[in-house]
Image (cartoon, helix red, strand yellow):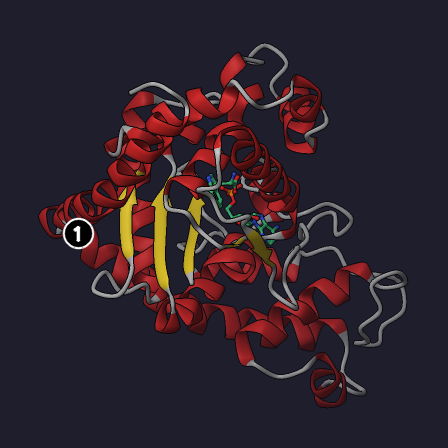
Amino acid sequence: MRIFSGIRPTGGLHIGNYLGAIKQWIALQEKNECVFCIVDLHAITTPYEPKELQKNILEATAIYLAAGIDPEKSIIFVQSEVKEHAELAWLLGTITPMGELSRMTQFKEKSKQHKDYINAGLFNYPVLMAADILLYKSQAVPVGKDQEQHVELARTIAKKFNLNFGKIFPEPETILPKVGAKIMSLTDPKKKMSKSDDPKSCISLFDSPEDIQKKIMSAETDSGKEIIYNVTKKPGISNLLTIYSLLTDKSTQELEKQFKGKGYGDFKKALAKVLIDYLEPFRRKQKELQTRDVYVKDILNKGASRARIIAQSTMQEVREKMGLI
Ligand code: AMP
Ligand code: TRP
């Protein structure tokens, strides 16, 4: 299968991004043709600092590599370096109903969050995302739960294109992780973990051991004192159990047994240790890659060249079908 996914280089990628999206990619790259993109054109739809963008792109690449994405197996590249993304987005915009775009939850949330930055790019964001996916004729898209609606819109756009102009696009499916599709905030376990929230609510992949310890120890827990997985009654502890379970490959039932009779404090201390150990290679790799800019840029250049070949061939077909040639 051809697989496509992307992450915005907005700085401070967190364990929600990793457990919801990137962790799945590692397994998928073994048996599929994977294209992983650093979607800088998406990142500029919300307020950002131009000087920080390059740093964030290299940081996101370091995360991909540290997590185990292999540039020999998968294509890793930066979206704006393959111009066909923007071109296809324009063309697909002409067949995307405004009504569909107005329904998008992420647009509504982000417009509320950045009231004086509601731009046409933010509104058209899902069209660009559909272009990303369809440009590579991708069949599946591994993402967290919050992106499911956007992938469904990409399906709708693919269907409409095929119907209007002739079939060229597969209808892409979402791949959601069975567990961890929505990691919740540490300070408010009813909300998803998000990098735009309070830093205390979220563990960044490059957080220092001290910060991890502090954030986990002060994470919101529930009344009672037993370590039990129950999302409605104990959303805080259940979220922490989910994180623990994903990092250790132990089921939440096994963890309930392991921590029977122990209090929240003991459990949190153990989780902080698991997280610190798990994230150690990320911190190490980031430090190492910070001194190897040339190597990282070379990976991105090679990735873009490989991506361009596929993108240009799809665009040739799209232009022909739409009567532009
Ligand atoms: P973003 O940071 O919005 O570009 O998200 C990148 C990827 O991480 C997407 O596949 C999201 O669905 C996923 N993601 C973001 N936040 C979470 C979360 N709290 N839990 C699980 N997955 C997430
Ligand atoms: N919109 C995604 C997010 O916010 C990032 C993204 C852009 C993406 N293009 C994509 C994800 C294509 C999957 C496929 O997380």
Q: Residue at x 28, y 24 (%)?
A: 51
Pick whichever, 291 or 112, lies toward us: 112
Image coordinates of residue 179 in percent, x first then y, are 65, 67
Q: Residue at x 59, y 46 (%)?
A: 200
Label 1, secondary structure: give it: helix
Residue 44 visible in the picture: no
Left or right: where does residue 83 sit relative to residue 102?
left
Residue lying farthest top? 116
Q: From the image, which quarter does the N terminus lie in?
A: bottom left
Mark 1 lies on residue? 299
Q: Based on the displayed image, in which of its 4 quarters is residue 159 positioned? A: top right
Residue type indicated by callout 1:
Ile
Image coordinates of residue 141 in percent, x first then y, are 51, 53
Pick whichever, 288 or 213, lies toward us: 288
Image coordinates of residue 202 in percent, x first then y, are 57, 49
Left or right: where does residue 80 sit relative to residue 45?
left
